Image: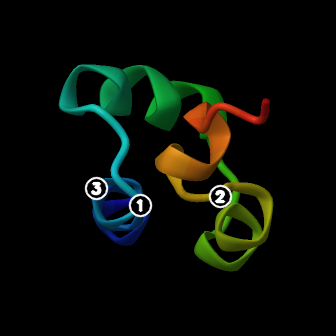
Amino acid sequence: MEKVERLLRDYGYPEEAIPNLLKEIGTLDYEKVEQLIMPYHDITADKS
């Protein structure tokens, strides 16, 4: 789970969101998480 936590930080997710995200991710392995998530700034970018 430490690798997933580090990945979330590297991807720019807010510190206060990481514990909730780790709960949501649950038992997924690192490789699956890496495929499913994207960098935070890509998610929050203004698409207009």
Q: Between residues 1 and 9, which one lies in front from this camera angle?
A: 9
Work out which residue is located at the far left of the displayed protein and give it.
Answer: 15
Secondary structure at numbered mark 2:
loop
Residue 46: image location, x then y, percent: 65, 31
Q: Amino acid at mark 1?
A: Tyr
Residue 44: image location, x then y, percent: 58, 32
Label at residue 38 = 2
**Residue pictured at 49% horizontal, 47% vertical:** 41
Q: Is residue 41 left or right of residue 25?
A: left
Whether tag 2 and tag 3 are in contact, CB under 8 A, the answer is no
Label 1 or label 2, whichever comes before in sequence order: 1
**Residue pictured at 34% horizontal, 51% vertical:** 12
Q: Between residues 37 and 33, which one lies in front from this camera angle?
A: 37
Quarter of the image for residue 48 reads top right
Badge 3: few (under 14), some or many (20 or more) residues near its Cα, within 10 Å? some
Q: Is residue 46 left or right of residue 19?
A: right
Provide the residue designation for mark 1. 11
Q: Amino acid at mark 2?
A: Met
Q: Amino acid at mark 3?
A: Arg
Quarter of the image for residue 30 reads bottom right
Quadrant housing the N terminus: bottom left
Secondary structure at numbered mark 3:
helix
Label at residue 9 = 3
Give the alpha-carbon distance from disc 1 to disc 2, as whole Å: 7 Å
Label at residue 31 = none
- Name the colour scheme: rainbow
Secondary structure at numbered mark 1:
loop
- Whether residue 35 is situated above or below residue 9 in the rendered picture: below
Whether tag 1 and tag 3 are in contact, CB under 8 A, the answer is yes
